[in-house]
Structures are given as structure tokens and as C-alpha cells.
Amino acid sequence: MAASHPPKSGVDNTYVHTLDRQYVFHSWAQQGSLDPMVIAGAEGCRVWDYVGRSYLDFSSQLVNTNIGHQHPKVVSAIQAQAASLCTIAPAHANLARGEAAKRIIAKAPAGFSKVFFTNAGADANENAIRMARLYTGRSKILSAYRSYHGNTGSAIAATGDWRRVPNEYASGHVHFFNPYLYRSEFWARNEEEECERALQHLRRVIECEGANAVAAILLETIPGTAGVLLPPKAYLQGVRKLADEFGIVLILDEVMAGFGRTGRWFAFEHYDMTPDLIVFAKGVNSGYVPAGGVIISEPISRYFDDHFFVGGLTYSGHPLAMAAIVATLDAMDAEGVVENADEVGNGPLAAGLQQLTERYAIIGDWRGVGVFHALELVSDPVYKTPLPGAEVLKLKQQLMENGLLVFTVENRIHVVPPCIVTAAEVEEGLAILDRVLKNYTASR
Ligand code: PLP
């Protein structure tokens, strides 16, 4: 563990925890039963508390610290920007913003020309939806049941699962089933059937909703919090064809999967297709300063040359966030961070997770690419009965006690380390997973 800063006098785990419980209202939580972990500092793939207890961070916090914690080049770029210009209105031009957009366009496929900046992923989806509606003059947005697009008006209404239900106020949102072979909605026996039937289902949804009422299909390229649901290769190409056939804008939400997580700059690079709008956030600057945005393809961008775009945010393209993007992307290039996610993620990490899947019947399914993996836990492998959430939390707690942080959702452990993770750290993390799963299964 790297040296932590000496704690300020009077500051310790108990003080920070008490302060939090007294004054902080947490997201996605029942407030009365919270016991948040205290984090005092971090570096690379590790975080630590005030008494020097350290953890290997295989959660990347909220799957966003792709470049790891406290990258010195990004930290000093933010400091330098803060020293010269902290804030400007979005209407002004600024060097950091222009350089950030230029670098993002350089990573995007040919045919993408402009970047609209937002504060995070949800508002990026809001604005992508708005662009698609203004561009097509249509209103409906089709999105998948197994998806998450953020926690604001249209983004949460576009989200497909239980998270949208109490928040469903935005109108014009329609859902469809996306491929998930392990629990197929289509009674598919293999990937080809799953793909073909899912595409046929989507075609029917478009026809039934009225093709010329549909502005956009919004999909996570690889649904993340829904379980790292890698689509069959032909699926996204099929969706692209449907969008073209019906004149629908295809928006790919790359908030979680983009900027290196899958071992490519964008996850859709695995699928030999491109969308019309790319939504990004998280990994673009690893969340050092909040940022997100929409990468806009040439025809949509040109449309707004002579049509007013009704949308914007006070902090769109905030200089500190932009400086962090420039430094992050430059460091990722210089240090081969995306290549590392590919090599270590698809090498030792994937091999180790496969071994664990073979060893423990409790792992019903393992899916993943790069440093983006989910272990789906079941109490009965034949009936695929999901392991109850309380048991998953117990496992998460045991992993933490052994020094490993993971991201858990429903009956899944998401193994999502930073893209900079080393083979040695992977070995260490897998050994903890193995030990905890062994003890857990022995005690059942
Ligand atoms: N889209 C996807 C795929 C996400 O995973 C998330 C957040 O996890 C969002 C959008 C929302 O991003 P934010 O929380 O930055 O608003």
C-alpha cells in the first residue's frame, strides 16, 4: 500500500462515519440501515481508511475509475486548470474544452464530428434523447427492459428495470426485451436463436408502436448494471439495420462500457457497427471531476447548424472536468491503459473467473470482456434460482473483510477493476474471491 496522508488531528473512521450518518442523505438506500465504508485516500487500484486498512478496489467505485485512483498527471492537470480558470459559461470558447472534444472525436469512429458536454451520464442520455427527437420530429424512445440509463427524467424512464418504476414521469418511453441467453425471454437454446428472436421481437415492437413515431432506439452496448449482458455479435448489427430501415436514430449508451472498460475505446468496436449518437461519462476522465456527453455523428451535427438546439447546462464543458479529460486520455494513450485492460482482463482475469465458475456451482453464469465481468450467483444451478440479495451482501462483506471491494447488484458480483490493473493484482483479487467462495460454500 502506498503511504497514506497522515490523518488530520481529530479525524478518524469513527468521526467520518458519525458525520456521514448524521448529515448525509445517501442515494439508492434506505437511510436508517446504512453503514457506509469510510475511505480516506486511494492510489491506483487501492483505497484505504484512516487506520491504514487497505482494499483492492475491484469495483472501480461505480465502475468509473478506469485509470485508477489519483493518477498524478490527471491530478496536476486539474490543479493547473484550477490555478488559471475554474469556471466559464458554456457559450464561451476555452482551450481545455476544445482540446477535450478534439481528443474524444479522435477516439470515435469516422463520421462523428462534434461533442456536447454534460455533467454526467444521465444528463448525457437526456440530451441524446432530445437531439433524436428534434432531429426526427418523432417522440417515442425504445429502450431495453434490462438497462440503466441514469437517474433523471427521461433517463430513468428509459431505464428498463425496477429502478424506473417509481420515477416514471417522462412520456414516450417504450421497452423491449434485449438478449440474455442465460434467462432467455424467447425460449432460445443458443445464441443464434436468441439473436434472431430478439431482433424479430424488436421489429414487432417498432411496427406496433408505429415506425414513424419512433425517434430513437437507446441501448447500452453491453448492459452493465443489468449484468454485463454481452449481446450476440449479430444483434447490434441487426439493430443497426432496423434503425436504418425505419429512419430511427440509434443511440448507444457507453457510459459504463466506454473508454477502455472492455479493452477497446468503445464497446461497440467489438461488434463491427456504429451508432448515430454515442453517450459517454465515467471512464472519460475516471470521474475525477464529473463529466459526460454525447458524441454526435455528422448528419445530426449538421442538422443543428441551422436548427436551434433547445438544451444546455450551466456547467456544460466545465474547465476542471475538461482538463481532467485531456490529461486522462493523454495518459491512457501514453501508458497503454486500454491495451492493458484487454491483455490483463481477457487474459489472467478471464481465465481465473472461468476457473472459479468451474469450481463453484454457486456461480451459475460468468460473462465478461476486458475488465468488465459479472458472476451470476444461484442457489440452485439447475433451476438457476437467483441467490437471495442478503446472501450476496454477506459475500460482499466477507470479500471486504478479506481486503477486496467488488460491485454487487441483485444476485451478481461484478468484477470490474480499473483498466490499469496488473496481473499480480488480479492474482491477489482472485485468490480472495476463491477463499471467500470456498468458505461460503463450505458453510452452506
Ligand atoms: N448509463 C449507464 C450505462 C450507466 O451505467 C450509468 C450509471 O451507472 C448512467 C447511464 C448514469 O450515469 P450517471 O450516474 O453519471 O448520471
Image (cartoon, rainbow, N blue to C red):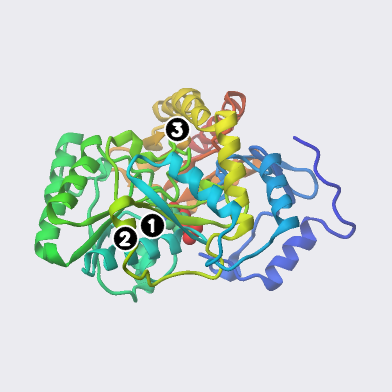
CA gap, disc 2 to disc 1?
7 Å
* In contact (CB < 8 Å): disc 2 and disc 3: no
Q: Position of residue 37 (x, y in %)?
A: 66, 54
- Residue drawn at x 59%, y 29% as measured from the top left: 335
Q: Quadrant of ligand 1?
A: bottom left
Indicate the amino acid at tag 2: Gly
CA gap, disc 2 to disc 3?
26 Å
Mark 1 secondary-structure assignment: loop
Q: Which residue is mark 2?
A: 160
Q: Which label lies toward us, 1 or 3?
A: 3
- Horizontally, residue 185 falls left or right of residue 97, namely left
Q: Position of residue 334 (x, y in %)?
A: 59, 30
Residue occupying the far front of the picture: 306
**The residue carrying mark 1 has its beta carbon less than 8 Å from ligand 1:** yes
Indicate the amino acid at tag 3: Gly
**Vertical arrangement, residue 423 with respect to residue 46, above or below:** above
Q: Earlier in the sequence, mark 2 or mark 1?
A: 1
Q: Position of residue 280 (x, y in %)?
A: 44, 51
Crowding at dot 3, Cα within 10 Å, few <14 / some 14-19 / many 20+, comes out as many
Indicate the amino acid at tag 1: Tyr
The foreground one among 67 and 62 is 67
Find residue 148 and name its label: 1
Q: Is residue 359 visible?
A: yes
Find residue 200 and name its label: none
Q: Earlier in the sequence, mark 1 or mark 3?
A: 1
- Horizontally, residue 208 falls left or right of residue 348, namely left
Residue occupying the far right of the picture: 9
